[in-house]
Image: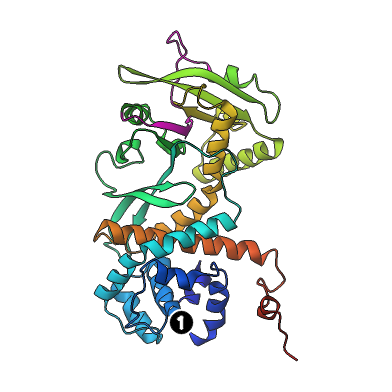
């Protein structure tokens, strides 16, 4: 990410790096800027390319609006005020979102099942520490519509105080929504709230959350999972969660991992033990042999295999989420309005997707890590 940040700064020695980076964008990226309304008149910017470079300096490098304008002026990219740059960021929302969508599809992340009748929403969140010794800590929660990657909700909250951790209560839910979430959101109270608002959820099970059988006796999780001895074997069980006095009906859908995936999970637990100087419980290691998902969807609507396929689709973008979180964790968060915050999130997501593509192509194209310009244009230099 350091090299990526330097590429954006406008130094002459790095101009060729910027050209390589621009070459990773979808071919119609400049035309999309005008079609989206992000660029009606350039005014302070000499080109659409300069505008994008300055915007990515702000969101990708974590600079404040004021620092970005100073650096853009020093690099000869633009003479612009921080207020003008904020307005440009707001206008860029409808430009950056389709660029992110195109890069995600290009990376191979696409829905391969039958078209969902539901509105699919992937939920995630992270903590941001703004620069400086007195920088504020914020927790952001965001919801991305899939597969189009439209941000339909972004919540900014203080990290301090009660009810600041990841929880489903942060999100507005409409009837028919299908939420896809990782185990950090596996809380019975939040699941009950989603159902109460007419939505459904597919969430990675946190093994510490107790499940109950039809007779309301505790559901014995490990003995049931052991009935799946072969890799790829799928099982499902009718279970429920208790949210206070309320019983939330659902299904546990589970899949045994391959030996390679099990070994990777074991290594991750080994690293946790070493880093935190703790002993991981044997049952925790055994849980790592399975993918366990809780859903409120009835079996008549979606089979266990389809439920797991939906979760796999969300997991496909997990690497993007992880890279996005590393970018979100640092920088100045625009708290001015929802529009600028969404555009800032799309800018971060665009940088994450470009970084992922750069890494992917660097290992597959050639020793120099990119496709030759002469090859793309069909020309050569004598």
Q: Position of residue 330 (x, y in %)?
A: 39, 61
Above or below, 167 relative to 323: above
Describe the colour scheme in one phrase.
rainbow
* Point 45% across, 10% down: residue: 217
In magenta, the rendered stretch is: 197-220
Residue 206 lies in magenta, yes or no? Answer: yes
| Residue at x 46% of width, y 33% of height | 203
From this view, report whether residue 325 is shown above or below residue 261. Answer: below
Residue drawn at 54 percent across, 85 percent down: 13
Query: For the point 37% across and 31% down, which residue is it?
Result: 199
Q: Main secondary structure of the magenta part?
A: loop
Is residue 182 part of the magenta span, yes or no?
A: no
| Nearer to us in this view, 154 or 68 | 154
Q: Position of residue 140 (x, y in %)?
A: 34, 50
* Residue farthest to the right, as pictured: 382
Residue 240: x %, y % from top left: 43, 19
* Helix, strand or loop status at disc 1: loop
When the figure is inspected, residue 282 is found, relative to residue 224, above or below; the finding is below
Residue farthest along the bottom direction in this orientation: 382
Q: Nearer the viewer, residue 128 or 17?
A: 17
Which residue does the numbered mark 1 point to in the structure image? 10
């Amino acid at each position: 990410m350091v090299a990526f940040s330097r590429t954006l700064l406008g130094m002459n020695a790095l101009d060729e790096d910027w050209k390589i980076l621009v070459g990773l964008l979808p071919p119609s990226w400049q035309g999309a800027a005008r079609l989206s309304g992000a660029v009606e008149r350039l005014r302070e910017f000499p080109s659409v390319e300069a505008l994008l470079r300055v915007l990515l300096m702000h969101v990708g490098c974590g600079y404040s609006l004021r620092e970005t304008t100073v650096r853009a002026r020093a690099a000869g990219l633009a003479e612009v005020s921080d207020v003008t740059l904020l307005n440009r960021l707001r206008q860029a929302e409808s430009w950056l979102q389709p660029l992110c969508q195109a890069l995600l599809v290009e990376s191979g992340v696409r829905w391969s099942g039958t078209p969902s009748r539901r509105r699919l929403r992937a939920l995630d969140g992270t903590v941001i520490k703004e620069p400086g010794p007195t920088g504020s800590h914020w927790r952001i929660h965001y919801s991305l519509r899939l597969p189009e990657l439209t941000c339909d909700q972004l919540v900014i909250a203080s990290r301090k105080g009660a009810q600041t951790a990841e929880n489903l209560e942060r999100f507005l839910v409409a009837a028919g929504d299908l939420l896809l979430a990782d185990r950090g959101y596996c809380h019975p109270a939040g699941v009950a709230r989603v159902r109460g608002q007419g939505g459904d959820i597919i969430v990675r099970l946190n093994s510490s959350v107790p499940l109950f059988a039809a007779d309301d006796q505790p559901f014995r999780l490990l003995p049931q999972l052991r009935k799946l001895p072969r890799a790829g074997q799928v099982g499902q069980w009718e279970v429920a969660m208790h949210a206070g006095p309320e019983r939330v009906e659902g299904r546990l859908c589970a899949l045994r991992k391959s030996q390679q995936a099990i070994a990777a999970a074991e290594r991750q637990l080994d690293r946790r033990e070493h880093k935190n100087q703790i002993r991981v419980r044997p049952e925790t290691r055994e849980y790592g042999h399975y993918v366990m998902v809780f859903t409120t969807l009835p079996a008549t609507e979606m089979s266990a295999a389809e439920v797991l396929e939906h979760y796999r689709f969300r997991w496909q973008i997990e690497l993007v989420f992880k890279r996005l979180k590393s970018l979100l964790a640092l920088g100045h968060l625009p708290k001015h309005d929802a529009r600028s915050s969404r555009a800032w999130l799309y800018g971060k997501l665009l940088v994450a997707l470009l970084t992922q593509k750069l890494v992917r192509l660097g290992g597959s194209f050639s020793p120099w890590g990119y496709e030759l310009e002469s090859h793309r244009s069909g020309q050569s230099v004598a």
